[in-house]
Image (spheres, helix red, strand yellow):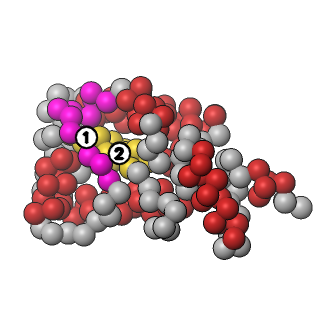
Amino acid sequence: MTEEYTPKIIGFCCRWCSYAGADLAGAMRLQYPPTIRIIMLPCTGRVDILHVLKAFEVGADAVFISGCHEGDCHYLRGNFQAWKRVARLKKVFTEIGLEPERVEMFHVSSGEGPKFAVLAKEMTERALRLGPNPVRVEARAVWLASMAKEGKPSTAPGNENALDSRP
Ligand code: FES
């Protein structure tokens, strides 16, 4: 994490599985980045596309939804509905020029604390690689400038300089 850019990541977690998995990771004293903010839900089926878009609107750099494993949803098909919404969001993001990797679906059970720690690290690494959400205009400009200074011009959306300098 650079000094200028500390990612903000929102995780919508089902109370029956992933939230308990996150709790277990804490109880096991597993290290994962403090970039994750968890919102507990009764089921991932409760997550609407608008909730995810709102998270990005208020400055999240990445969002994940983590629910029960396939076939284990306490409400039968909630995690399947969430998976379909994430797939739809990825498609929309691609169409509007946002990186689809900014949103992801995971399945973590209450006994999988280590898996939760791994996904928290993975989402943080992704957010670091992708840079600030373009809605965070100032943070993104600072990040793009620091990337250019380090000789690593990004071709991510919003980096017109990198696109202009292509041969
Ligand atoms: Fe966990 Fe539905 S109850 S995803």
Q: Is residue 109 visible?
A: no
Task: Give SS at disc 1.
Answer: strand
Based on the displayed image, in which of its 4 quarters is residue 10 positioned?
Answer: top left
Secondary structure of the residue carrying numbered label 2? strand
Badge 2 density bin: few <14, some 14–19, many ≥20, Cα 10 Å? many
Question: Which residue is located at x 64 percent, y 53 percent?
Answer: 141
Q: Position of residue 56 (x, y in %)?
A: 46, 38
Q: Estimate the x, y position of residue 16 in percent, counting from the top left.
A: 13, 41
Badge 1 amino acid: Ile
Q: Residue at x 44, y 47 (%)?
A: 62
Quadrant of the rendering where the C terminus is positioned: bottom right
Q: Position of residue 110 (x, y in %)?
A: 13, 51
Instruction: Give the answer, above or below, for where 122 lies relative to 54.
Output: below
Question: Is-magenta flag for residue 62?
Answer: no
- Residue topped by disc 2: 10
Question: Is 72 left, or right, of 123 in this rendering?
Answer: left
Q: Give the tally of numbered discs.
A: 2
Earlier in the chain: of badge 2 and badge 1, it is 2
**Mark 2 Cβ and ligand 1 under 8 Å apart:** no
Q: Answer yes or no: do the residues labelled 2 and 1 have beta carbons within 8 Å?
A: yes
Which range of residues does the magenta coloring cover?
A: 36-47
Q: Residues within 10 Å of mark 1 (few under 14, many from 20)?
A: few
Give the camera-side residue of 38 and 44: 38
Q: Is residue 41 magenta?
A: yes
Q: Looking at the picture, does residue 9 appear above or below residue 50?
A: below
* Residue at the extreme bottom: 150
Q: Amino acid at mark 2?
A: Ile
Question: Which residue in the protein does label 1 denote?
Answer: 39
| 95 vs 152: above or below | above
Residue 3 in view: yes
Tell me which residue sits at (38%, 50%) in the image: 9
